[in-house]
Amino acid sequence: MRSLSIFVLLLVASGCALRAQGTIEGTVTLTGRPMGPPPASQYGLNAGQVAASPKQLAVVYLEVPGAKKAPPVKPVVMMQSGYQFEPGVLAVQTGTQVIFPNDDSDYHNVFSYSKAKRFDLGRFRKNETPPALTLDKAGEVRLYCEIHQHMRGVILVLDTQHFATTDADGHYRLTGVPTGTFQLKAWLSEKTSVMQEVTVTAGKTLRVDFSGVRTASSR
């Protein structure tokens, strides 16, 4: 009987914990411009080999002071495919490992001079994936290829587990968000970031749009 009572209490506590979370969703107005210039013709590549330059997406994240979660055990993948970085924008938590598989038939050489992570992986071909790169400092890591100068990518390293990258239409959704008042930020580019104070209510969905006139409403 005592075991049953403890079990019931655990179920109640678990249910309360779940109800103490909320959701944030909305859209971020984007220009849709590509991240890099068109591929140069000197590489000898035909149109069928090269993917379109990735569009500039946004990353929306919630700053929750003192709340951290262990990063994923498995490395996160950022492909090099169609002579572009895929995805062009990647958001990860600090401490995450990232690998850069090469899916193209030519050499690539991923490097960055960013303050958050300075590195040069050297040249490697298809099926020659370099070791995973650990991103242990928050900030922007801008990626380039030493061989193909049109290639652009960015990894946004965050000190939070509550983040999402917008889709092609600018939509985002954050679930399992703790209740309370926090700073919600939308990173659009190296020079553009907007912020809004939000209050999350348990079991509710908060609508937050980032545009020329930024508003928030709860439903």
Image (cartoon, grey):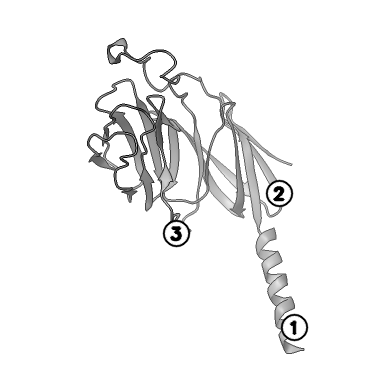
Residue at image position (42%, 13%) is: 47
Q: Which mark is residue 205?
A: none
Q: CA distance from mark 2 to mark 3?
A: 26 Å
Residue 215, can we see it? yes
Q: Residue at x 37, y 45 (%)?
A: 98
Give the labeled residue for mark 2: 204
Residue visible at 30% across and 47% down in the picture: 131
- Viewer-closest of 33 and 84: 84
Quadrant for the C terminus in the image: top right
Please name the residue shown 28% across and 42% down the image.
117
**Of circles 1 and 2, which is in front?**
1
The extreme top residue here reads 41
Mark 1 → mark 3, Cα distance in angstroms: 32 Å
First in residue order: circle 1 vs circle 2: 1
Q: Please identify, in this view, whether the residue under mark 2 or under mark 3 is nearer the observer.
A: 3
What x and y, as percent, mark residue 23?
Answer: 65, 47
Q: Name the amino acid, label 3.
A: Ala
Q: Does dot 1 land on a helix, a strand or a loop?
A: helix
Taking the image as drawn, is residue 192 in sight?
no
Q: Amino acid at mark 2?
A: Lys
Mark sitting on residue 5: 1
Above or below for 86 versus 93: above
Q: Earlier in the sequence, mark 2 or mark 3?
A: 3
How far apart marks 1 and 2 lie (CA) works out to: 30 Å
Q: Nearer the viewer, residue 92 or 131?
A: 131
Q: Which residue is denoted by mark 3 in the rendering?
A: 70
* Residue found farthest to the bottom: 1
- Element at label 3: loop
Horizontally, is 116 left or right of 216 in the view? left
Residue 59 placed where, x, y %?
49, 36
Pointer 1 local density, CA inside 10 Å: few below 14, some 14–19, many at least 20: few
